[in-house]
Amino acid sequence: MTLRAFLLATALAAAATPAATAAPATYYLDCQPGDDTAAGTSPDAPWRTLAQAGAHTFAPGERLLLKRGTGCKGMLTLHGKGADGAPVRIDAYGSESESKPHIEGGGARAALHLLNTEQWEIRNLDLSNTGPITTTDHRAGLYVELTDYGVAHHFVVEDVDIHNVNGDDSKDPDPSGGILFAANGDKTPTWFDDIRVSRSTVRTVDRTGIGTSSTWGHKAGANQRQSTGVTFTDNKVYDVGGDGIVVQDSRGALVEHNYVDGFNMRSPKHYNAGVWAWDSDDVLYQYNEVTHGHGTLDSMAYDIDGGNNRNVYQYNYSHDNEGGFLLVCNDKSMESKGNRVHDNISINDRNTDTSSYGVVTVSCAASIDTRVYRNTIVTDRSGTELVHNNGLTGVIFEDNVFVGAAGGGALISDADSTYSHNLYWPTDYSRDAAGVHADPMFTSAKPVAPDDVRLKDGSPARGAGMGGEHDGAKHDYFGNPIPNPPNIGADQSS
């Protein structure tokens, strides 16, 4: 081959080789010294305003980084979408000794708003949204909204702090609150697939702390769509006007290791609960703690509500809630079936509205095959019933410890549920022929924490349970294996 032919062949081969694909761009935003005329692609030349970031359409794999220590005002509405394996990412940059970048919405619909999009990951932001006092304006910290979109995949929210959102008391389907995912519309069935909210904090918001909502639930009939892959883990929720953490119209959700302190604080129009679901199937709640719920109506820590099927509450802790520990409340137009509440602890929850409520309340329409077992429920609040039933069936109580306040009157006001092998103290319950009427011999005479309701040696609750397989659970609240026959209550230690 001649030199000329060799050079020509080399040039042709080079021309046929595809150019290297450019890496997805990263954009920087600093609301103090930034400049909207800058390219925004360097920390030395960041954009300045939320509007400039909102004017960009983000492509798969691109990132928007906000400067730590910066403060921005207004609503950040982002456009574009990611792709499978290449989500759009929002995060912080700069020294970790600086505070998270802060966006104050100033009374807008949300401080950070995503509409009809998917494949986003959001981390390390601080969001608030305080406007004039209102009874009509919907406001949120982070609001992800779909309207007649179809299915939207993959949303991650991690280490995000939401606080001071003074929205109205709107609950469904377009709520106010902290971290919210809403599937709206009436033309194209719409739902989420893969929502993960973790290690985030919500404080002083009205009205919902963390939640999903939908117009495509039970009443949509054949067009019903339930979101999938919903996971809320390791979050902290404080001082919320309404619900703490709520899963609506979902299937297979996981809610675990969350802490809710103060819910139903400012919601005169609605019933609320700490951690619960509506119209949702196969939801697992475990290792959550709920306390300081306000109000004596539907303000229980946990709730099996309308259209819930095969939901499980296990290894949760509830204490010092004014509305009680558990509500079982099906909607008359829906089926609620196969739910389980086991191996939980309730200490000093109460509900002094004895005409309709107790620490455990069975209300609304009847449910089917709801089993409540191996729980320890103890209160020091006189005037509080341990269980109150408004004349409904479908709930079975087995192997539970029920301890009421000394001189507090009847423990159980329930002539319809089924009771077997429970322990009652100090008042007996005659409808449980196999029940135990005795002091359970807790390690503390005045329990205020889970370890206080462990059983002493010689407790009459030891080995007095029904036995048999309820659910395949292998351990109790404290991690002890469950013997056969089991102890009564949440402590299965040998």
Image (tube, rainbow, N blue to C red):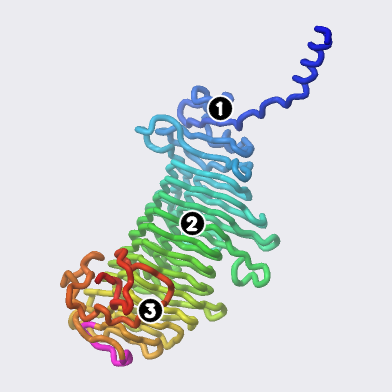
The kind of residue on which mark 1 rests is Gly
Q: Which residue is mark 3?
A: 361
Residue 60, image quadrant? top right
Residue 183, image quadrant? bottom right
Per the image, label 3 sits on a secondary structure element best described as strand
The answer to whether residue 431 is magenta is yes
Please name the residue shown 54% across and 70% down the image.
279
Of marks 3 and 1, which one's residue comes earlier in the chain?
1
The kind of residue on which mark 3 rests is Thr
Of marks 2 and 3, which one's residue comes earlier in the chain?
2
Relative side of 27 to 422, left or right = right
How far apart marks 2 and 1 lie (CA) works out to: 34 Å
Please name the residue shown 46% across and 75% down the image.
339
Label drawn at residue 453: none
Numbered range of the magenta stretch: 425-433
Q: Which residue is mark 2?
A: 231
**Residue sitting at the far top:** 3
CB within 8 Å, label 2 to label 1: no
Residue 97 picture location, percent across and down: 35, 33
Q: Which residue is mark 1?
A: 40
Question: Label 3 crowding class (10 Å Cα cut-off): few <14, some 14-19, many 20+?
Answer: many
Quadrant where the C terminus is found in the figure: bottom left
Per the image, label 2 sits on a secondary structure element best described as strand
**Residue sitting at the far front:** 1
For the residue pair 295 and 390, the one nearer the viewer reads as: 390
Question: Label 2 crowding class (10 Å Cα cut-off): few <14, some 14-19, many 20+?
Answer: some
Of marks 2 and 1, which one's residue comes earlier in the chain?
1
Residue 367 picture location, percent across and down: 48, 81
How far apart marks 3 and 1 lie (CA) works out to: 57 Å
Residue 443 picture location, percent across and down: 17, 70
Q: Does the magenta stretch mainly form a helix, a strand or a loop?
A: loop
